[in-house]
Image (spheres, rainbow, N blue to C red):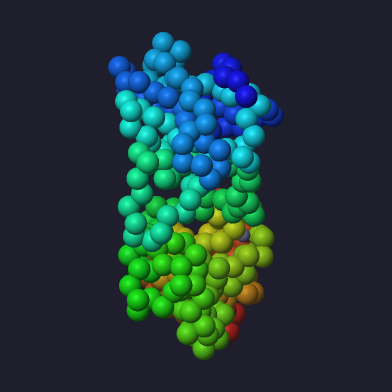
Amino acid sequence: MKKVEGYPQPLGVTIKQDKVNFAVSVSSGKKCELLLYRAGKTEPAQVYEMPEEEGLGEIRFLAVEGLDVQKYEYNFRINEKVVLDPYVRELARTRKFGEVPDADLHRVRGRFPTSFYDWEGDHILKLPFEEVVAYSLHVRGFTKHSSSGVKQKGTFAGIVEMLRGLVRGYANVSVASSALSRSGRTVMGKCPRCGKDVVEGKKSFFCEGYYDTPPCGFALWKNNRFFASKRKELTRKITAALLRDSRAHVTNLFSERKGVFYDATVVMVDDGGKYVRFELEFDKRKGAK
Ligand SMILES: [Zn+2]
């Protein structure tokens, strides 16, 4: 195991072949060391200086060659105070719930990441801002009370336990929720472009393929010119009919030219552009035009 030249980015630990790179932000004038522990031991087995003159700006960095990441753990020591890597991914010695760890006694240490979390294709939702309802949850606060009934208090595993309980408890609402899309919105019908669910948003009925990459751009805007000029609201009912049959019979459309109301069939014409077009088919029987 020997210290070799490292690189300043990214911060934290990066493992490449037989080199482990360490980078940490430390303000100027402070002493910084890398502490390496044998797993399970509380005294560092190896200490490497990370002097300011070898750093870049406020970033101190170095790499260690031949470090067995399975057998070692690490911390930094800045001005004689032992600190965890702010970018640490995993801690050694999972502490007891509620117990305050003492890094100075080397009781908590960083573990080297040996496996990476598999997001299984999950990606950022790219939700339009006005469609976002955000909830936050305090993991520890939510699970620490005895009434939570979970075994693994204060952990994400505890949240999972609670969710299982909630899902069981609300199993009987599954029938009602079958009309809900994956984002929990009411489904109006299927997208004519990609076949995914079309759901209701504040300003439009849009395809949930909007969240895909590349996004499906299908949407029926509530404030669209066609319906506005006919003083007609694009209702859920009309939307559902348009999605099902590409047409909807609509009553009491207003004619600006004649100043009268009439009934007609609105036909949805989708040529794949940003906006869907609408055309009218008139009811022959009534002769209105
Ligand atoms: Zn679509």
The picture places residue 178, in percent across and down from the top left corner, at 57, 80
**Where does the image place residue 53, in percent across and percent down from the top left?**
41, 10
Q: Quadrant of the N terminus?
A: top right
Residue that protrudes farthest toward the top in the picture: 53
Q: Is residue 274 above or below residue 64?
A: below
Question: Residue 194, percent across and down?
Answer: 67, 60
Q: At which x and y percent is residue 179?
A: 55, 79
Residue 112 lies in what quarter of the image? top right
Question: Residue placed at 33% from the left, 32% from the top?
Answer: 81
Number of numbered discs present? Answer: 0
Task: Name the residue furthest bottom.
Answer: 172
Please report the residue visible at 51 percent of the width from the left and 42 percent of the height from the top.
41
Q: Nearer the viewer, residue 221 or 31?
A: 31
- Residue 14 shows in the view: yes
Q: Nearer the viewer, residue 25 or 41?
A: 41
User: Which residue corresponds to the image point at 61% horizontal and 40% vertical from the top-left?
Assistant: 71
Task: Work out whether residue 79 or residue 190 is closer to the camera in this orientation and state it.
Answer: 79
- Residue that appears at 38% across and 76% down: 148
* Residue 282 visible in the displayed image: no
Is 159 drawn above or below residue 114 in the view shown? below
The part of the image, by quadrant, that contains residue 218 is bottom right
Ligand 1, seen in the image, is in the quarter at bottom right
The reply, left or right, for residue 33 in relation to residue 90 is: left
Residue furthest to the right: 17
